[in-house]
Amino acid sequence: MRRAAITVAVLAAWACAAFGGPYTEAGVNGYVNPENRGRHANPLKDPNAVVNPIFRGWATACVSYEPTPQYMQPWWRDPNKALGPSMTDSDGVYTVSLGDLYQEDIDAGVPPGRITLSFSETIRNQKGDDFVVFENGFRVTESEYYCELGYVEVSSNGVDFARFPAVALMTSPDPNLHGYYYLDITDIYNLAGKHPNNGDAFTGTPFDLQEIADDPNVILGIVDINNIKYVRIVDIPGNGDFSDDAIRHIDPCAWPNWAYYSANHPIYDAWLTWGSGGLDLEAVGVLNEQEYSADVNLDGVVDMADLALFASAWRSHFGQSNWIRKCDLAEPKDFVVDGSDLAVFAEQWVAVEKWRLRSAK
């Protein structure tokens, strides 16, 4: 009976499905209001907003901070601002900037800005996403965002790192824009700074350690994805001289016979930037394990809100605008939301995560 009722709701919503961009995964809320069952809250307007209990830890120390030579005011150069819980506000006061590079710097081989953080809570390759990076990008229009992007790398020993393979499908910007280049974030995957954390949205970008399981340093055992103690963020000057790792990812245009991208792509973002130039890092949070994959919206309980999301993604495949990565529930992943995923959803219906039960006490 339970599965039949869920199926009816899913089929009804599918009739309204739309089609569009490939990387539609949502950011993770930094704040919630316990009174609205753990969903998004605006800390600037809601006096009951608290740090999301889905997080079990935050960066506790800065191991190294290497901004670019670009001039920045001293308040943008304090790496301690990246420690502890997300503390966002409308002016980005709680961020540390990595700095930007001019074209002559890039041509001369000056490295982009970077910061390495350590954690008292070990980051492990558990069920679901494992940690979240908070930048201070913001939404400009319904589909355009101001983003300053960065590569994300992890390490067990602080010396050897594995980089998350990214995808960036944006096109070359108009050279007359002078740095104010807005992005469609559905073109971006596995880069820090994708999700808005300013204005009306306080979210961070999630990362799943399983995605670097085939990295050479992981295969050799140099980086242990069940014992990550360091996260490094490397700024990307968005002039197109730096590339993604698309050839390690499935091309959404290959449907129905899935194949990998044939080439990597140049990365474009806001460039040149001044003042708090480059990526502005606010926090890196360690997630509690997500035991129930059907908790699509990550509020700790599988309920009608998750059913609505699942129904909106019903019969979609990777590359369609109504595709939701977290609705591809059955293992192994097949990039399609279908009956096998519905069976998982029905099995987990009304399940509650342990971290949610702890936070309610």
Image (cartoon, grey):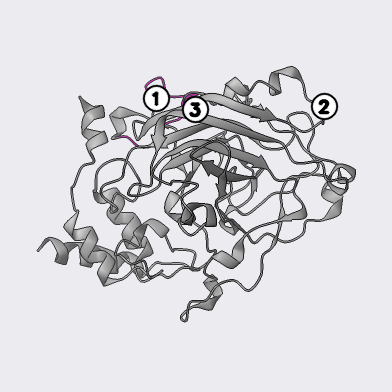
The image shows residue 3, relative to residue 62, as above or below, that is below
Q: What's the residue type where badge 3 is placed?
A: Ser
Q: Quadrant of residue 288?
A: top left
The mark that comes first in sequence, 3 or 1, is: 1
Give left or right: position of 60 versus 174.
left
Residue at the outermost right position: 104
Task: Decide which of 271, 315 is in the foreground and name it.
Answer: 271
Q: Which of marks 3 and 2 is nearer the N terminus?
A: 2
Q: Nearer the viewer, mark 3 or mark 1?
A: 3
Q: What element carries label 1?
A: loop
Q: Furthest residue to the bottom?
A: 257
Above/below status of 274 relative to 248:
above
Q: How far apart are marks 1 and 2 (CA)?
A: 36 Å
| Residue located beneath label 3 in the image | 86
41 left or right of 118 in image: left
Quick one: SS at disc 3?
loop
Asked which secondary structure carries label 2, the reply is loop
Q: Mark 2 belongs to which amino acid?
A: Tyr
Q: How far apart are marks 3 and 2 (CA)?
A: 26 Å
Residue 266 appears in view: yes
Q: Name the residue under label 2.
A: 71
- Residue 157 in percent (x, y) is at 51, 37
- Asked whether 172 falls inside the magenta stretch, the response is no
| Amino acid found under the numbered disc labelled 1 | Ala
Residue position marked by numbered label 1 in the rendering: 49
Answer whether labels 3 and 1 touch (C-beta < 8 Å). Answer: no
Relative side of 57 to 240, left or right: left
Please tell me which residue is depicted at 36% across the width and 66% down the height of the picture: 333
Q: What stretch is highlighted in magenta?
A: 38-48
Q: How crowded is mark 3: few (under 14 residues within 10 Å), some or many (20 or more)?
A: many
Residue 15 appears left or right of 158: left
Q: Position of residue 265 (x, y in %)?
A: 69, 63
